[in-house]
Amino acid sequence: MNTGPEAVEVRPWREGEPEPAYRYFPRVDAPVLSIRTQGRWRPAVVQKREDHPDGRVVYGVEITLIIDGMRGTVERRYLWDPATMHPAPAVRGALG
């Protein structure tokens, strides 16, 4: 199996922390990222981008993962890292 770094999932923003600036993407024509998680590259539809005051960029995505042996589409938040994610061409049924 090809090993490599995995995308880092991050927790949501909490009240009392410096609030990030949000950019939301419409479902139609939303950007697609290829994200390395669970040992492989997976397409993920971008729902939002968070620009944090400390310089971190976090992407909220919809991605299909295997959880407890079952395949399902879920929402996750990943810290931007070009070693573990990159823009991908938009494809119909990207999460199928």
Image (cartoon, rainbow, N blue to C red):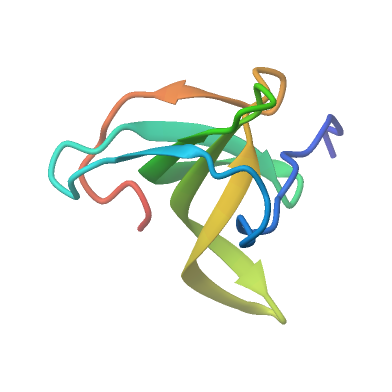
Q: Position of residue 4 (x, y in %)?
A: 84, 29
The answer to whether 51 appears left or right of 18 in the picture is: left
Residue extending farthest front:
16
Residue at 78% x, 38% y is 6
Q: Note whether 76 is above or below 51 in the view shown.
A: below
Quadrant assignment for the C terminus: bottom left
Nearest to the observer: residue 71 or residue 63: 63
Tell me where residue 13 sits by quadrant. Answer: bottom right
Q: Position of residue 5 (x, y in %)?
A: 83, 31
The answer to whether 60 appears left or right of 1 in the picture is: left
Residue at 32% x, 24% y is 89
Q: Note whether 31 is above or below 64 in the view shown.
A: above
Residue at 69% x, 79% y is 69
The tally of labels here is: 0
Residue extending farthest left:
28
Residue at 55% x, 44% y is 19
Nearest to the observer: residue 85 or residue 71: 85
Quadrant assignment for the N terminus: top right
Q: Position of residue 67 (x, y in %)?
A: 67, 75
Residue extending farthest top:
82
Q: Position of residue 93 (x, y in %)?
A: 26, 51
